[in-house]
Image: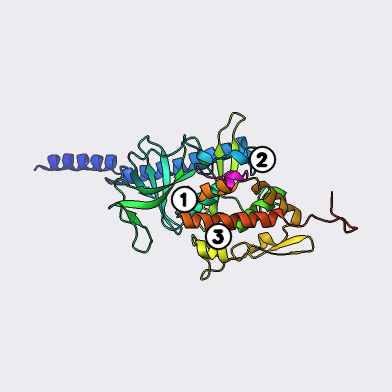
Amino acid sequence: MSNKGFRTFIVALAAALTLTAGLPVAGQSDSKQGKQEKEQKKEEKKEEKKEAMAQGTPVFWQEPTDIASRNLLLGPGGEEMKPDLKQIIWEESDQGGYSVKWKVRDASGRKWVAKLGNEAQPETVATRLVWAAGYPTEVNYLVPCVQITNAPKPPSNKSVKRCEGKGFANVRFEARPDNYKRLDMWSWNKNPFAGTKEFAGFVVLMGLLNNWDLKDENNKVVYVPTDGGGELRYVVSDLGATFGKTGGPISHSRNEPEKYIKTGFLDKVEGGNVRFDYHGKNIGLFNNITVEQARWIGDVLSQLSEEQIKDAFRAANYSPEDVEGLAQEVMGRINALHSLPAPTTASGTPAP
């Protein structure tokens, strides 16, 4: 190559290097673009949450004027929201928590979170009793046996019962409607309803269910669009740690009817307050429950019939023996609240 040709080659090479110096290495552009898209989606979700919080009306309790006719076999979703079980397709695992949770779609394309394991049955019942008392909650159904297409093998350290070959037993389906927005968690100790009789009554109801897992992470604000502009429903999204024994990390249990029936509920009345036989997280919530507040939630729940309460347990596929025993215990606890002595005036006479 002549000197002139060599110089021409060098000039061309330098120009090419200058043009390509600013270009990323193959693969880096896609990676950077992916991160940017994720960040953009996060920001969009934040804005959606802010907008929903600004538009919605906070709701914690609404008087259940139809409590005596509510269908506790179907629960808050009724017949119309039941999952279409002709085909259930696994989409992804929902990480975290005690139970195996999978995001799935039913045959009609609706989204659900399927919970497998020991919490599915008690959560199905607890949701129905909470809803019956007038508190907003999740929509869920329990399916005794279901096939889930493409489902992975559950982790070996999780207890998941099988049925009909490759089916899964007692699976709780929790609805995820497209028009609902799941926002931030709410705190047991700092929320818009603390100090109200409705909030105190809800705490008592948690004690009635033996829900020992009263942690903020189980609470969720859910935006639900309505004709009036939308509601911010304060729900306890995880009610699985119920119908067992309250206590610490070693002694507590879930979904153990025999232990639930044997545990105490009300301890005594002292200085106008009710003392509860509760041992679990956030025990301080029970310190200042007045007789009036406890009686109030007892009066609400006492409107439920024995058959309605049994239906809540039937909805969770409990055995006839467990349905009978658990329902009798729940009714006994409701009656204990309903029968608390009326508050007295300073002169010692019952308050009007």
User: Secondary structure under badge 1?
Assistant: loop
- Report which residue position mark 2 lands on: 63
* Residue 128 coordinates in the image, percent (x, y): 54, 46
Q: Are marks 3 and 1 in contact (CB under 8 Å)?
A: no
Residue 159 against residue 1 in the figure, above or below: below
Within-10-Å neighbours for mark 3: few <14, some 14–19, many 20+: many
Q: Quadrant of residue 96?
A: bottom left
Residue at horizontal 33 percent and vertical 55 percent from the top: 162
Q: Residues within 10 Å of mark 2 (few under 14, many from 20)?
A: few
Q: Mark 2: which amino acid?
A: Glu
Q: Is residue 246 visible?
A: no
Q: Which mark is residue 213?
A: 3
The Cα–Cα distance between marks 2 and 1, rounded to whole angstroms, is: 25 Å
Q: Is residue 339 magenta?
A: no
Secondary structure found at label 3: loop
Question: Earlier along the polypeptide chain: callout 3 or callout 2?
Answer: 2
* Disc 3/disc 1 C-alpha distance (Å): 20 Å
Distance CA(mark 3)–CA(mark 2): 26 Å
Question: What residue span does the magenta drawing correspond to?
Answer: 129-139
Crowd class of label 1 (few under 14; some 14 to 19; many from 20; radius 10 Å): many
Q: How is the image coloured?
A: rainbow
Residue at point 39%, 46% (across, down): 103
| x, y percent for residue 340 | 73, 57
Residues tagged 3 and 2 counted as in contact (Cβ below 8 A): no
- Which one is earlier in the sequence, the residue at label 2 or at label 1? 2
Could you tell me what secondary structure mostly forms the magenta stretch?
A: loop
Task: Reply above or below: 146 against 55.
Answer: below
Label 1 sits on residue: 316
Q: Amino acid at mark 1?
A: Ala
47 displayed left or right of 155: right
Give me the residue at 55% from left, 62% from top.
Answer: 260
